[in-house]
Amino acid sequence: QTIDPALFIPAFVPTPEEQIPQIVAAARTKYNTGITRSIAWRKEQLRGLYRCFDENEALFCEASHKDMRKNHAETWTFDVLILKNEIVDALENIDDWVKPERVNPGIVNILDTAEIRRDPQGVCLVIGAWNYPYQLTLGPLAAAIAGGNAVIIKPSEVASHAAMAMTHLLPKYIDSTLFPVINGGIPETTALLKLAHDHIFYTGNGAVAKIVMAAAAKHLTPVVLELGGKSPVIIDETVHLPTVAKRVMWAKSINCGQTCVAPDYVLIPKAKEAEFAAACEVAVKELYGDTRTAPEYPRLITLRQFDRVKGVLEAQKALPNTKISVGGETDADDLYIQPTVVTGVKGEDPIMQDEIFGPLLPVVTVESIDDAISFIQTRDKPLALYVFSNDKRVVKKVLERTDSGNAIINDLMMNMTMSVLPFGGVGPSGQGKYHGHHGFLTYTHARGTLYCPSGMNALTEPRYPKMAYTKNGR
Ligand code: NAD
């Protein structure tokens, strides 16, 4: 079998640990020359990043297929296209974003000029996750470039082909000293975290986020943490269940449920539970036909993830209250788990403890909207919250009495494609925002700057001690 040379992806090689401090130091030395302050230069780098994906789309898609059997269309739509949109948005708006904001200096400083500059954070570290490796690693990079920063890029080693595709191609399109890629797992990331950075952007799970935040605290480095959690879906009696089921099962099955904003569980009135489950079964057939053979349905990324998700399913199946209403099949050799709907679930069940991050959908019944709200209030604040209702009062009540990183009414996940809305979690689901202008704000700091006249001493005299106090007899 001949290999298309255009689709060549080198084997995964971790960056030697002893080289890491030198690579970071080289980025800082070049950053200190001031090269990244030029807006023309930033645009050139952003264009380079765009072209990298434009000219090598097939290779990037193939890498994700090798990692998790993600089909090319899914990688293109939910990973590459989202990244490209971020780059285009930055290119279109950077001239406005960088303009210093003039502010009124007030009567005391009437002869001065006051402005708020957006200055770069400096030399930043981005630690990416594996599930959407391009947008999660390079979306922050695009915002950081727009902000005038240098960035040490650390892709997830779990999506090793995607990591190597980025390592192989990025240096051909963007400055490799200011934007170096460092590969590896825990030892290499630990080595990176020992060094002083000006900003750290971490995407992944909450346990590692605590390690990142503790390392950042040693240097007083600001962090953005993009984490996960159990994102609920509230469904009331006013909606058309086949439509809702199709949207929910699409969002639950895409990337085989390995999406940070995937619906984690459903809260629904008891009277609607069976009808919803039946509609989910129809929806999966409409979306994929047979998920076992459909090329559009991906797999769990590793045997470790497969065993974890299967373990949750098995523990749940053992409970007498539980019914597998849809799916339930698994195959370890193929890392396959069928889109599965579990009904009769209680809040204290195993499947309701941690983020599922796989294609299992527990359904919990509630007595009322107040009951659904209380259920959410007693748990960690989620990354996303979804409400399906045609009653505006219900929507208003849910929004006013719950909290989440993002909220969507009558759909799921579509905020991911928009640069105008801030993206990020709250509390245990994360801190800090990005996408579009919000990413630019994250990657710059507001530098309050005052320009004063160098003369006009008569006006400055009253502030000096002898004038201000002694002459007034105090
Ligand atoms: P992962 O295993 O790829 O880990 C993320 C990064 O952390 C990797 O670069 C990895 O090398 C590094 N890492 C792992 N262990 C480490 C350690 N002990 N010390 C230092 N660095 C370490 O990804 P994951 O954590 O399995 O990702 C899944 C989680 O991420 C889910 O909870 C999901 O919800 C969340 N997530 C959130 C977002 C978001 O934007 N909010 C996006 C994707 C995933």
Image (tube, helix red, strand yellow):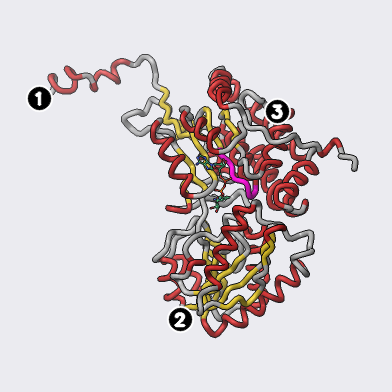
Q: Is residue 292 magenta?
A: no
Image quadrant of residue 250? bottom right
- Element at label 2: loop
Q: Nearer the viewer, residue 266 or 5?
A: 5
The amino acid type found where label 2 is placed reads: Glu
For image coordinates 72% across by 50% down, the residue present is 75
The amino acid type found where label 1 is placed reads: Arg
Residue located beneath label 1 in the image: 474
Tell us which disc is closer to us: 3 or 1: 3
Sequence order check, earlier mark of 1 and 2: 2
Sequence order check, earlier mark of 3 and 1: 3
For image coordinates 53% across by 70% down, the residue present is 316
Q: CA distance from mark 2 to mark 3?
A: 57 Å
Q: CA distance from mark 1 to mark 2?
A: 71 Å
Neighbourhood count class around disc 3 (C-alpha, 10 Å): few under 14, some 14–19, many 20 upward: some
Relative vertical location of residue 86 with respect to residue 375 in this rendering, above or below: above
For image coordinates 55% across by 18% down, the residue present is 29
Q: Which residues are magenta?
A: 127-132
Report whether 156 appears left or right of 68. left
Residue located beneath label 2 in the image: 367
Relative vertical location of residue 311 with respect to residue 91 in this rendering, above or below: below
For the question of whether residue 182 can be seen, the reply is yes
Q: Report the quarter where the N terminus lies.
A: top right
